[in-house]
Image: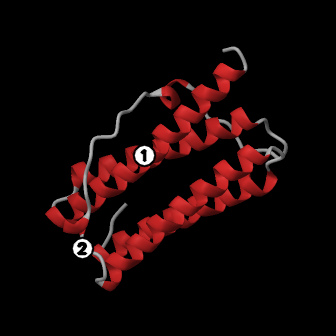
């Protein structure tokens, strides 16, 4: 990926957030279990917040220095599952697996971009995005573990 400007990078990140919103809204719309629907609707809302935050950065309404960084643990559950293709009528646990893998890949992308960024502002942007993806990954992995425990795994 070659970007020409900070604005182009932020626009790329905004598009990734929009894709995530679409995925979670689609998963929520297809969910047959009310708990699953709420889970995916909540994740869609989180992704919309990320989109708004990035749009605020582009407009100068939000400064990266205002962001609070914190340590997010990684239980690495998604690291040990295979990729699945999304299909209508999939079980809730399979949709959670897909969502975990998506967040894992987003986290890795932003970590890689942060590591290779030359400008300090870009490093901070990618670290912020990494942290947000890490929060989602942890949330999904926790939901998955809880669901598997209910099922006797």
SS assignment at label 1: helix
Callout 2 crowding tier (Cα within 10 Å): few <14, some 14–19, many ≥20: some
Q: Quadrant of residue 44?
A: bottom right
The answer to whether residue 145 is left or right of residue 84 is left
SS assignment at label 2: loop
Q: Quadrant of residue 2?
A: bottom left
Return the x and y of residue 124 as percentages of the image width and height. 22, 59
**Residue 58 is at least partly visible in this image:** yes
The answer to whether residue 139 is left or right of residue 149 is left
Identity of the residue drawn at 66% across and 28% down: 147
**Residue 82 is at least partly visible in this image:** no
Return the x and y of residue 28 as percentages of the image width and height. 73, 54
Which numbered tag is attached to residue 63? 2
Which quarter of the rendering shows the N terminus?
Answer: bottom left
Q: Farthest residue to the top: give it.
A: 152
Identity of the residue drawn at 34% across and 85% down: 59
Task: Tell me: residue 120, above or below residue 76.
Answer: below
Identity of the residue drawn at 45% across and 49% down: 106
Towards the viewer: 66 or 112: 66
Q: CA distance from mark 1 to mark 2?
A: 20 Å
Callout 1 crowding tier (Cα within 10 Å): few <14, some 14–19, many ≥20: some
Return the x and y of residue 62 as percentages of the image width and height. 29, 76
Residue denoted by label 1: 135
């Amino acid at each position: 990926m070659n970007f020409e400007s900070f604005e182009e990078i932020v626009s790329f990140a905004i598009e990734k957030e929009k894709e995530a919103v679409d995925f979670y809204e689609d998963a929520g719309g297809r969910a047959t279990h009310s708990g699953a629907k709420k889970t995916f609707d909540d994740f869609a809302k989180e992704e919309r917040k990320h989109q708004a935050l990035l749009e605020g950065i582009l407009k100068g309404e939000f400064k990266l220095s205002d962001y609070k960084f914190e340590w997010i643990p990684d239980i690495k559950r998604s690291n040990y599952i295979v990729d699945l293709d999304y299909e209508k009528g999939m079980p809730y646990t399979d949709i959670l697996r897909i969502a975990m893998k998506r967040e894992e890949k987003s986290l890795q992308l932003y970590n890689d971009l942060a590591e290779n960024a030359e400008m300090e502002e870009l490093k901070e942007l990618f670290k912020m995005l990494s942290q947000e993806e890490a929060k989602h990954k942890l949330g999904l992995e926790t939901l998955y573990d809880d669901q598997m425990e209910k099922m006797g795994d």
